[in-house]
Image (cartoon, helix red, strand yellow):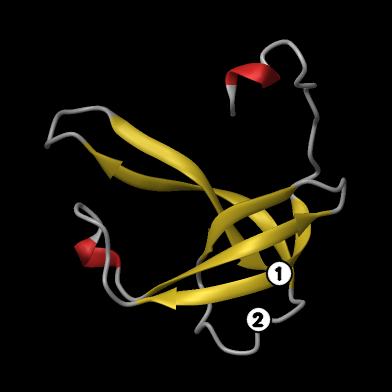
């Protein structure tokens, strides 16, 4: 967000449902994500209107154009054996 947006953003609650607008399969990961390749990233059109970027999980990455999806909360990683566990939102085909 640019500084001009400060004070102009509005909070929205999202249902966690949407559809795939565009998608791609990533084969060369950014540093720290090498163990996850290949993975699918998509533009998700939410039912409420905003478009979000997200990872599609539990799917082979075929025929995703227009697929209905829903948000899920997943474990992403942890900081060492006794460290903080990180969670985040991903998307599954509904």
Above/below status of 49 relative to 79: below
Question: Which residue is tagged 1?
Answer: 20
Q: Nearer the viewer, residue 81 or 52?
A: 52
Q: Secondary structure at mark 1?
A: strand
- In the rendered view of the protein, which quadrant contains the N terminus? top right
Residue 11 at x, y = what percent? 77, 22
Q: Nearer the viewer, residue 60 or 2?
A: 2
Residue 64 at x, y = what percent? 65, 81
What residue is at 48 percent from the left and 42 percent from the top?
88
- The part of the image, by quadrant, that contains residue 56 is bottom right
Numbered circle sitting on residue 46? none
Q: Is residue 62 left or right of residue 39?
A: right
Q: If you read the primary sequence from the N terminus, does the residue marked by circle 2 or circle 1 appear first?
A: 1
What residue is at 79 percent from the left and 39 percent from the top?
14
Q: Nearer the viewer, residue 18 or 52?
A: 52
| Farthest left residue in view | 81
Q: Is residue 28 left or right of residue 68?
A: left
Instruction: Note whether residue 14 is visible.
Output: yes
What residue is at 65 percent from the left and 89 percent from the top?
63
What residue is at 59 percent from the left and 54 percent from the top?
53
Instruction: Note whether residue 94 is visible.
Output: no
- In the rendered view of the protein, which quadrant contains the C terminus? bottom right
Q: How far, Cα to Cα, is label 2 from label 1? A: 7 Å
Q: Secondary structure at mark 2?
A: loop
Question: Which residue is tagged 2?
Answer: 64
Above/below status of 40 relative to 81: below
| Farthest bottom residue in view | 63
Contact between labelled residues 1 and 2, with CB atoms less than 8 Å apart: yes
Above/below status of 63 relative to 92: below
């Amino acid at each position: 967000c640019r500084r001009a947006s400060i004070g102009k953003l509005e909070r929205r609650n999202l249902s966690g449902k949407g559809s795939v607008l565009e998608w791609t399969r990533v084969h060369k990961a950014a540093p720290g994500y090498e163990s996850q390749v290949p993975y699918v990233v998509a533009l998700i059109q939410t039912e409420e209107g905003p478009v979000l970027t997200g990872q599609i999980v539990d799917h082979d990455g075929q025929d995703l154009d227009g697929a209905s999806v829903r948000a899920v909360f997943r474990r992403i990683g942890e900081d060492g054996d006794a460290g903080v566990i990180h969670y985040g939102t991903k998307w599954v085909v509904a």
